Image: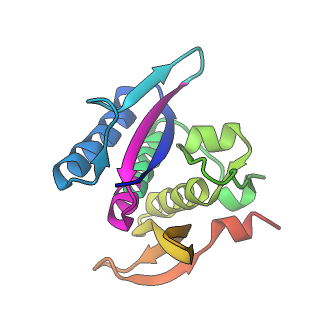
Amino acid sequence: MSGARIIFEIPTAPEPLAILLACVAKLRRSGSLIAASPEPTITADSSPFWRFSVSVKRDVRAYQALLDALTDVDDWCRTVWHFPPLYLSGLRYQPQPLGIEIWRALPGVYLHGGGDCDNLATARASEIRSEGIPARAKLREIGRRGRAVHYHVTTAILDGRGRIVSEEDPSEILST
């Protein structure tokens, strides 16, 4: 079965790594994880980030679980560092080349001056959650070409039962 490779860029701290490893363990138990090696690849160089590579089956539930984990990492980052409000930060939407998926935690988004839809939607969901309002990054199918499915990620504001009450598109807002 074909899959997608997602590269996470997370702060070099044990907490973000533990969040992603817990998600990977759940995906492995569900059969959604494709691993070329027994464990996800973690590389560290002189940067303040680890690159954590995961291959998953092309399954919306697996992508959503990874988006939730990245939002949890962003939540943790907010407990350590202060970030200006996303829409007042000067960050911009920066599309990635087709076929490359780098999902950056908040510090990487701010360091790079922006990000693509998954980076911005998780950053915004975390910001909303920091105000005590339930939110999550939400995966949306936007088209198909043959067997390939194309997705876009937005930010969903939730009610107390987890139902979507409104939705924002940080990529669109930060494109102008």
Residue at 74% in and 63% down: 174
Number of numbered discs present? 0
> In this rendering, would 108 be left or right of 11?
right
Q: Where residue 40 appears, x then y in whole percent? A: 35, 33
In the image, taking residue 6 as reference, residue 91 lies left or right, namely right
Residue 5 drawn at (x, y percent)? 47, 45
Tell me residue 4's x, y (percent): 45, 51
Please say whether residue 130 is one of the residues in the magenta stretch: no
Q: Quadrant of the N terminus?
A: bottom left
Instruction: Name, please, the residue furthest toward the right.
Output: 176
Q: List the single residue furthest toward the bottom.
A: 165
Residue 111 vs 171, above or below: the answer is above
What residue lies at 70% left-to-right and 51% top-to-bottom?
97
Quarter of the image holding residue 145? bottom right
The residue drawn where x is 50% and y is 40% is 7
Q: Is residue 54 magenta?
A: yes
Q: Which residues are magenta?
A: 49-66
Question: Who's the residue at 27% across and 54% down the image?
Answer: 32
Query: In the image, residue 22 lies at what x, y percent?
Result: 25, 42
Q: Nearer the viewer, residue 5 or 8?
A: 5
Q: Which quarter of the image is occupied by the C terminus?
A: bottom right
Is residue 122 shown above or below 8?
below
